Image (spheres, grey):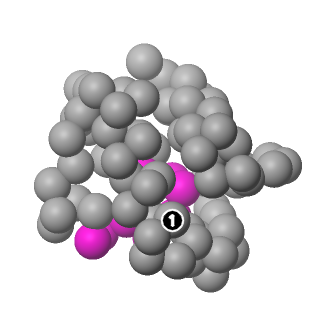
Amino acid sequence: MTRDEILAGIARVAREHLGFEGELAPSARLVEDLGLDSIRLVTLAAEVENHFRILLEPEEEAAIATVSDLVETIAAKLG
C-alpha cells in the first residue's frame, strides 16, 4: 500500500468518524491544526486500527503529532 493510499484511508476515517471536511495535509498537526481533543484522538486511533487492521502501541501513538507521522507509522506496520 502506498503512502498516498494510506493518506486517503486516513482521510476517509477522519470524514466518517470525526466529521472532518476538506483536504487532509500530511503536515497537519493532529491537535493544533485539526483541533482533535483526547477523545477524538482515541477515536482516530481506534478507527485507523480497524480500517488498516493494525495495532498501534501506546508508545507509537504518543509519538504521532502530524498526519505524516501517522502515515509513516501505518506504512511501517503494513511493511
- Indicate the secondary structure of the residue bearing disc 1: helix
Q: Quadrant of the C terminus?
A: top left
Query: Measuring 48% from the left and 23% from the top, which residue is drawn there?
Result: 2
Can residue 68 be seen in this snapshot? yes
Within the image, what quadrant is residue 71 found in?
Answer: top left
Quick check: 3 above or below 33?
A: above
Q: Quadrant of the N terminus?
A: top left
From the top left corner, tell me how far across and down residue 74 is, in percent: 34, 39
Query: Measuring 22% from the left and 60% from the top, which residue is drawn there?
Result: 60
Query: Measuring 63% from the left and 53% from the top, which residue is drawn there?
Result: 18
From the top left corner, tell me how far across and down residue 58 is, in percent: 17, 64
Can residue 72 be seen in this snapshot? no
Quick check: 21 above or below 40?
A: above
Q: Is residue 21 magenta?
A: no
Query: Residue lying furthest right in this view?
Result: 22
Residue under label 1: 40
Query: Residue lying furthest top in this view?
Result: 1
Quick check: 34 above or below 56?
A: below
Query: Measuring 59% from the left and 45% from the top, which residue is drawn there?
Result: 17
Task: Judge the density around disc 1: few (<14), some (14-19), many (≥20) Cα neighbours within 10 Å.
Answer: some
In the displayed structure image, the side of residue 22 where residue 24 appears, left or right: left
In the displayed structure image, the side of residue 64 where residue 77 appears, left or right: left
Quick check: 51 above or below 35?
A: above
Observer-nearest of 56 and 26: 56
Amino acid type, mark 1: Arg
From the top left corner, tell me how far across and down residue 75 is, in percent: 34, 34
Picture mark count: 1
Give the extent of the magenta segment. 62-70
In the displayed structure image, the side of residue 1 where residue 16 appears, left or right: right
